[in-house]
Amino acid sequence: ILSLLILLTVMTFYVSCRKDDPDKSTEEETQLNKLKGEWTLVTANDGQDRTSDFFTSSTDTPASAPLKLSVTGNYVEGGTYNYEFTGRRPDPSPWPGDGIWKFGTNKGEEIIRDPGGDSEILMNYQVTDSDLIITFDIPDGSAGWEGGVSRVKSVTGHWTFTFNK
């Protein structure tokens, strides 16, 4: 009986000290789950309000046909995920129409758009279940990406995009 009691005590102690929680998600997986889905543009700013540049025509109001960002992918530790835009982007645009991204060093605040490519950009983000704010800098000399609607203003500078789910 004493041996059985000791064995039971040791097993209880071992199980209660177990450090691995199979139900616990990593920070990267938690953040990915918040980022995944379709996001609707609320505001775009590069020091000036550029929101109207991302709607179907210059006479549209923000309630008409805004840009949409879709974030997709299945979690893999250190993985890359997809993004795609639908709707109007100015030409040149601070965003390619689609591409890949991965988390930066600080998974709760940084993503890297188009990692390893010529258009790689470190972006900061804040995300909740319903709101996403992305900020990034386009370096001087960048030509931007084709968007389909011509505009004179360059894409270089500090950009802030606000989206809702």
Image: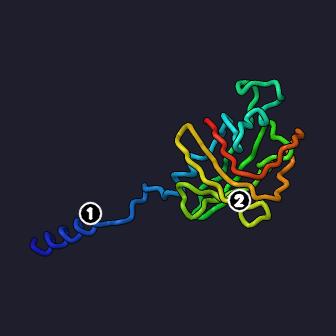
| Separation (CA) of disc 2 from disc 1 | 45 Å
Relative height, residue 133 to residue 99 (above, below): above
From the viewer's side, name the closer residue of 15 and 81: 81
Relative height, residue 97 to residue 79 (above, below): above
Quadrant of the rendering where the C terminus is positioned: top right
Quadrant of the rendering where the N terminus is positioned: bottom left
Q: Nearer the viewer, mark 2 or mark 1?
A: 2
Callout 1 secondary element: helix
In the picture of the structure, the residue carrying the numbered disc 1 is 16
* Left/right of residue 63 with respect to residue 91 in the rendered view: left
Callout 2 secondary element: strand
* Left/right of residue 140 with respect to residue 27 in the rendered view: right
In the picture of the structure, the residue carrying the numbered disc 2 is 121
Mark 2 or mark 1, which has the lower sequence index? 1
Residue at x-position 71% and y-position 36%: 49
From the viewer's side, name the closer residue of 148 and 74: 148
Q: Which mark is residue 64?
A: none
* Left/right of residue 9 with respect to residue 150 in the rendered view: left
Going by the numbered disc 1, the residue's amino acid type is Ser
* Left/right of residue 95 with respect to residue 33 in the rendered view: right
* Image coords of residue 118 (percent x, y): 80, 64
* Image coords of residue 36 (percent x, y): 62, 46
Residue at x-position 83% and y-position 28%: 58
Residue at x-position 78% and y-position 60%: 119
* Image coords of residue 11 (percent x, y): 24, 69
Going by the numbered disc 2, the residue's amino acid type is Ile
